[in-house]
Image (cartoon, rainbow, N blue to C red):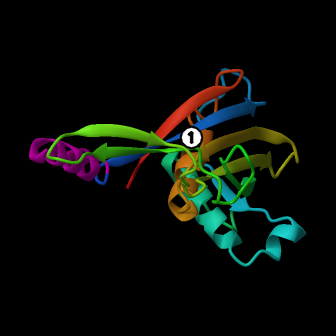
Amino acid sequence: MKRLLAVISLLLLGGCGGMRLVESNVTAISTLPPGTAPLAGAHYRFERLPSQAEQPKFEHVEAAAEAALTHVGLVHDEAGAQYSVLPSASLLPYGSDPWGSPASRGFGSVMIGGGGGGIGTGFGLGMSFPASTSYRREVSLLMRDLHTGLVVYETRATSDVPWADTDNVLPAMFEAALQEFPHPPAGVRKVGIEIPR
């Protein structure tokens, strides 16, 4: 029994450290010709829609996007920009309880223990688990050439993860959205970015 408890404790402690993997489904389209030189060093400014300007925490979205844009070599320069970048992000929490109940209807529990010094397992119906919540997030970037007005790059990343710390997850999603910038492969691809727990 002591050995079993020690193993369970180690497993629980092991899950508390290390890194988390934020997996995103990424779709990106570039209108730049395949032979175009990388855009590293190009200057950009942020663009905001009127609805975004009214959002009190939208600067967090811009900060997350800026970190990813810096990672691919672009320079934030509001005064001398060659490109505009329109970032966006959305968050939709949803529960995974198949019956739609917030927390009252679980489907069972597993018990480890036993009487008389023995070890046994049991399965009980009617026990309750709190409903778990996941978060569907989506980020996007739209990059426009300020001289021509044409969109040169469009990318979107979606992710379903159970962590509520959006300020840590969004930068990883923007980084995933810009993987292989400025010449991304066609179609949807899965990109994983590790972040600390």
Residue at the spot 13% in from the left edge and 44% down from the top edge: 1
Asked whether residue 58 is drawn in magenta, I would say no
Residues 68 and 193: in front is 193
- Where is the C terminus found, in terms of image quarters? bottom left
Asked whether residue 13 is drawn in magenta, I would say yes
197 sits left or right of 79 in the view: left
Q: What element carries label 1?
A: helix
Q: Which residue lies furthest to the front in this view?
A: 116
Residue at the spot 31% in from the left edge and 48% down from the top edge: 15
Vertical comparison of 138 with 60: above or below: above
Residue at the spot 28% in from the left edge and 53% down from the top edge: 17
Residue at the spot 30% in from the left edge and 44% down from the top edge: 112
How many callouts does the rendering have?
1
Vertical comparison of 149 with 37: above or below: below
Residue 41 seen in this snapshot: no
Q: Residues within 10 Å of mark 1 (few under 14, many from 20)?
A: many
118 sits left or right of 135 in the view: left
Residues 139 and 5: in front is 5
Residue 97 seen in this snapshot: yes
Residues 107 and 144: in front is 107
Q: Where is residue 142 in the image (x, y as percent from the top left)?
A: 77, 47
Q: Residue furthest left?
A: 2
53 sits left or right of 89 in the view: right
The image quadrant of residue 119 is top left
Q: Give the range drawn in magenta.
A: 1-15
Disc 1 target residue: 176
Residues 71 and 129: in front is 129
The image quadrant of residue 16 is bottom left
Q: Where is residue 36 in the image (x, y as percent from the top left)?
A: 66, 27
Vertical comparison of 185 with 37: above or below: above
Q: Where is residue 114 in the image (x, y as percent from the top left)?
A: 25, 45
